[in-house]
Image: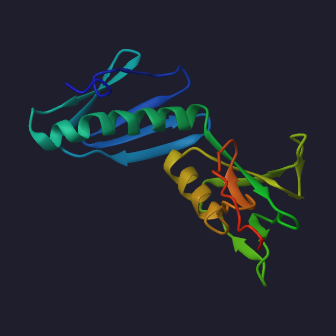
């Protein structure tokens, strides 16, 4: 039995769950998420908790049991609290600014890089004190879908990943970048 899969998911008071065969819809104060689960698992609501059970002990059912439980837990957390990722821009002249909903990154290229967020994702820029500004070096990616927040953050980071010599680039807040020693001069 999957240790993760057998743990029940507590359902907050302000979240409702709708089961329609393998289609599961979760509604909360932040929005609504829906997902179709594979036929190897069953989602059952037991009182104030959600339990993910597998149909049999076949290998595909065992593989998907913990995954489906985690996906459902992320859906419940997303519609009740939401997810946020912070990205930090380091480097002289590197900055981000918002033009409407579009994020415009000045990352040392010959052109500014524009990133349009997908539906359901909001982008904000903070300064070092945590105040919301139009132009700065800290980008907040937030939304209710954890997968979409992570993918959008990865797309932004991929514009200029941190390099190991000076550490310049876009990194996740708190990410450690292993530094390398540069070339030594002639002796």
Q: Is residue 105 above or below residue 175?
A: below
Q: Is residue 13 left or right of residue 38?
A: right
Identify the residue at image location x=83%, y=66%: 94
Identify the residue at image location x=52%, y=21%: 12
Total count of labels: 0
Front in this rendered view, residue 161 or 16: 161
Front in this rendered view, residue 64 or 178: 178
Q: Quadrant of the C terminus?
A: bottom right
Q: Is residue 48 above or below residue 79?
A: above
Q: Is residue 181 left or right of residue 78?
A: right
As drawn, the residue found furthest toward the front would be 187
What x and y, as percent, mark residue 58? 9, 38
What x and y, as percent, mark residue 147? 49, 50
Describe the colour scheme in one phrase.
rainbow
Q: Is residue 145 left or right of residue 153?
A: left
- Snapshot quadrant of residue 152: bottom right
Q: Quadrant of the N terminus?
A: top left
What x and y, as percent, mark residue 96? 81, 63
Q: Is residue 8 above or below residue 76?
A: above
């Amino acid at each position: 039995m999957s240790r993760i899969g057998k743990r029940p998911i507590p359902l907050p008071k302000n979240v409702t769950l709708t089961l329609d065969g393998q289609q599961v819809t979760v509604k909360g104060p932040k929005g609504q998420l829906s997902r179709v689960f594979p036929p190897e698992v069953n989602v059952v609501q037991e009182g104030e908790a959600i339990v993910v059970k597998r149909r049999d002990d076949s290998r595909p059912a065992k593989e998907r049991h913990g995954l489906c439980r985690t996906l459902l837990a992320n859906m419940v957390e997303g519609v009740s609290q939401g997810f946020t990722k912070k990205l930090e821009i380091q480097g002289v002249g590197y900055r981000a600014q918002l033009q409407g909903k579009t994020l415009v990154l000045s990352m040392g290229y010959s052109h500014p890089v524009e990133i349009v967020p997908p539906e359901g994702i909001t982008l904000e820029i903070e300064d070092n004190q945590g105040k919301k500004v139009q132009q700065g070096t800290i980008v907040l990616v937030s939304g209710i879908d954890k997968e979409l927040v992570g993918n959008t953050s990865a797309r932004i980071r991929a514009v200029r990943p941190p390099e190991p010599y000076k550490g310049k680039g876009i990194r996740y807040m708190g990410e450690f970048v292993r530094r390398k020693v540069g070339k030594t001069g002639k002796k």
